[in-house]
Amino acid sequence: MRRLIVEFVIEQVASLKVVPALMEIESMDVISFLRSTPEEVALICRIKFKNPDRKVEDVFANDFGEIQVLEQGREGYICYFRSRRRSVAMEADPLGPGVYLSPPYEIHDGRLRATFLANAGDIRRVLRLFSKSKISYKVISLMDAKFLPDSPLGQLTGRQRDVIVAAFKNGYYDVPRKVSSEELARQLEIREPTLVMHRRKAERKLLSSVIGES
């Protein structure tokens, strides 16, 4: 899995009118992406508006989602939870399946810095999409996604990580299940039996690291 960090100028991104509230934001940091799929984005965010009287609920009120303020901090910062589900009337995610948002995802000094996790082929596709867009961008870094050796994901092979992360992000472990093994295999461009094999091996290793058995 590869990790791509890209930086955009906020004024250029705002000109696309995808996120109308961008120009109202002084600074923002996504603390955690709880879910990032073509169907839904759920996150916990820390934000500060240029106008201290602005409220999160008002700014994102028409954004097809749920908003809950968690903390009204000092110096105008607001910590909030936000969930945004795509409706059939909305455009499909232009990044497509297999591409996941990850921290750091932030706005500071008029620039948006975004992080994407995907396999090498999807990263190339994302960069081609950016190149075809009307906004300029700067690649800050592009490298293999690193995991600490003693972390559970650090015990998996690259393919096992790709499969287990894709399964989790796309709702394979949700109740009810949102995606099948067959659909995941198509997204990752591998055969379904191969996907099932990697998923089961990954699950075995992750459970062993939690339970403490080899």
Image (cartoon, rainbow, N blue to C red):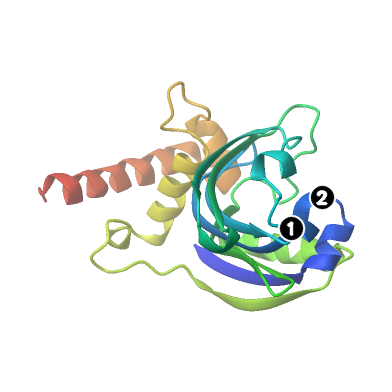
In which image quadrant can residue 14 be found?
A: bottom right
Say which residue appears at 63% left-offset and 78% top-offset. Answer: 140
Q: Mark 2 sits on what residue?
A: 20
Is residue 118 visible in the rendered image? The answer is no
Q: Mark 1 sits on what residue?
A: 51
Does residue 27 appear to the left or right of 145 in the view shown?
right
Say what amino acid the circle numbered 2 marks.
Pro
Does residue 41 appear to the left or right of 145 in the view shown?
right
In which image quadrant can residue 137 be found?
A: bottom right
Q: Nearer the viewer, residue 175 or 27?
A: 27
Distance from the alpha carbon under mark 1 to that under mark 2: 15 Å
Does residue 2 appear to the left or right of 134 in the view shown?
left
Report the disc number at residue 191.
Answer: none
Residue at the outermost top position: 176
Where residue 115 appears, as percent x and y from the top left, is 59, 64
- Secondary structure state at the residue bearing disc 1: loop
Mark 1 crowd level (few <14, some 14–19, many ≥20, 10 Å Cα): few
**Chain-order first, disc 1 or disc 2:** 2
Find out whether the residues at labels 1 and 2 contact each other: C-beta distance under 8 Å.
Answer: no
Say what amino acid the circle numbered 1 marks.
Asn
Say which residue appears at 65% left-offset and 45% top-offset. Answer: 56
